[in-house]
Image (tube, rainbow, N blue to C red):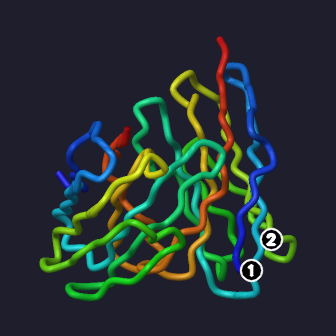
Amino acid sequence: EAQVTQNPRYLITVTGKKLTVTCSQNMNHEYMSWYRQDPGLGLRQIYYSMNVEVTDKGDVPEGYKVSRKEKRNFPLILESPSPNQTSLYFCASSLNRGHGYTFGSGTRLTVV
Amino acid sequence: AQTVTQSQPEMSVQEAETVTLSCTYDTSESDYYLFWYKQPPSRQMILVIRQEAYKQQNATENRFSVNFQKAAKSFSLKISDSQLGDAAMYFCAYGLQAGTALIFGKGTTLSVSS
């Protein structure tokens, strides 16, 4: 089944404790992206990648890191999480222009 | 900068009736794509329908259709024969090309009553 898999689905952590949210897609998509969803704000892009070793900042990149060492994987790293990073996070991938993104199931992150 | 506006935070419809969700966007580009995504309580983001700006014909997917007015920069979603399973938050999104940002509106919560 073609899908985007992100883990974990739920995560509660403490301020300052480094964490990684994994994302993997099995569709051989070149384009991958991370979004965060907050009430009243819709979805905002954090980072995106157009291919292996090619990443760039989205609208809200502060406090996040990404890497794209393999085509299928695009992890999101929070080096020192803070409470304002409490959010619902989505990984997404796309074949090419115009197809729209296929989204993962989301990760609900709470930073206390 | 491109923006997407959904002016209806909440909408309601009765089963079997038709409802239209509004979306407007602002762009200076001529070649772009527009999407409607559905997010049910399971929070999964599901692509409902997409429209290429260069196509004049409105996209249709079963009970879902759009009214794309390029000059007015309007992209509304019509749901016909509404079903209980249509209850969800709906997001309108704009994109220039994959790999760059999809710009999302803030969403419209649709409730369906029997």
Work out whether residue B16 or residue A30 is closer to the camera in this orientation and state it: A30
The chain to which mark 2 is attached is B
Number of marks in the rendered image? 2
**Is the C-beta separation of discs 2 and 1 under 8 Å?**
yes
Identify which residue is drawn at 40% across, 42% down.
B44
Local secondary structure at mark 2: loop
Q: Which mark is residue B93?
A: none
Most extreme residue toward the left, as rendered?
A70
Query: In this rendering, would B48 be left or right of A64?
Result: right
Residue that badge 1 annotates: B27
The quarter of the picture where the C terminus of chain B appears is top right
Q: Position of residue B12 (x, y in %)?
A: 74, 26
Identify the mark nearer the N-term, 2 or 1: 1
Q: Position of residue A19 (x, y in %)?
A: 22, 54
The chain to which mark 1 is attached is B
Report the Cα–Cα distance between label 2 and label 1.
8 Å
Residue that badge 2 annotates: B73
Identify which residue is drawn at 33% across, 47% down.
A15
Query: In this rendering, would A24 be left or right of B95?
Result: left
Three-letter code for the amino acid on which mark 1 is drawn: Thr
Most extreme residue toward the top, as rendered?
B114
Q: Residues within 10 Å of mark 1 (few under 14, many from 20)?
A: some
Q: Position of residue A68 (x, y in %)?
A: 20, 78
Label 2 and label 1 in one chain:
yes
The quarter of the picture where the N terminus of chain B appears is bottom right
- Placement of A86 over or under A49, stated as above or below: above
Identify which residue is drawn at 74% across, 65% down.
B68
Hey, which quadrant is residue B58 in on the image? Answer: bottom right
